Image (spheres, rainbow, N blue to C red):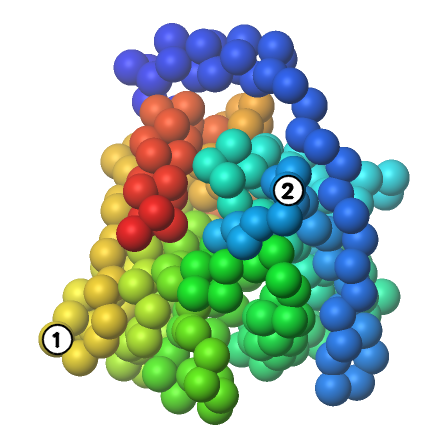
Amino acid sequence: MRLPSIALFLTLLLSAAHAAPAPMPQQVDIPLASGVLHAQLYKPDGDGPFPTVIALHGCGGLGGHSDPVLPRYRDWAAELLKAGSAVLLPDSYGSREVGPQCRVKEGHVKARRERVADIVASRAWLMKQTWVARNRISLIGWANGASALLWAVRPQNAARDASPDFRAAVAFYPDCRISAGLGWSTRVPTLVLIGGNDDVSSPPACRQMVDGAHGRSALARIVVYPGAYHDFDRANTPLHALAGSTDAATPDRGHLGTDAEARAEAQKEVAEWLAR
């Protein structure tokens, strides 16, 4: 964490301690081609129609032992709710009865396959809900969820119906290395947010991916936060090395931790991008 951001970090820590608790989500079941996708839904009061964000968890999964939504995603749901958006969080791992996939070498839930299918199914379900503003459905994802998002917004994955496409997409610290090598482009305005010191994902690969899309893609933009590491937007997480950790819900290398300044800046960036 950068030294100039310590005061801001303490301010955010105190404000978080006094913040109103996030409302309890409602579980919804979404049909898949084979099986059911469980998801958690946060919805503003009223009949809508509301802008809606499909929020995609990282490799550690959506919930904990007794909590359907981890605090890091609950915090973002609260932010989006304050802005008037509903939030749908598909549980890609729990729905398939698998645990965290951060350290699984050959996972059964692939970002480019099962998780894209979950995005497609979530969108189809939302399109049938009367409280949804169908032309204002957006995507946000973290790490593995952000990587799935990058696959989902590629032009070849566009829906074959006449309904509105995703309004916007925000990818927090995705693994851009494969996408950069494949000549990635997007049909949806896409914002990539990553820390300059991220040694779990690759800021240079994300820069290469976004720069390579210019001129043959919908709007793509990247913001690199100097000095910030992986999970910089995750509140109250001291910066620490992952080597030697036995936590299956974290990567096995690199560092992660809160950067309060980058977190605050990202909250503004996300709000502005989704309000486009």
Which quadrant would residue 25 be assigned to in this image?
top right
Q: Is residue 120 visible?
A: yes
Give the labeled residue for mark 1.
215
Q: Identify the residue at image location x=15%, y=71%.
A: 214
> Between residues 80 and 45, which one lies in front from this camera angle?
45
> In the image, residue 8 lies at what x, y percent?
38, 14
What amino acid is labelled 2 in the image? Gly
**Number of numbered callouts drawn:** 2
Closer to the camera: disc 2 or disc 1? Answer: 2
Q: Picture coordinates of residue 194 (x, y %)?
A: 35, 47
Mark sitting earlier along the chain (2/1): 2
Quarter of the figure with residue 238: top right
Q: Nearer the viewer, residue 227 or 109?
A: 109
Cβ–Cβ below 8 Å for labels 2 and 1?
Answer: no
Mark 1 Cα within 10 Å, few/some/many (few <14, many 20+)? few
Q: Which residue has dot 2 on it? A: 46
Is residue 66 shown left or right of residue 153? right
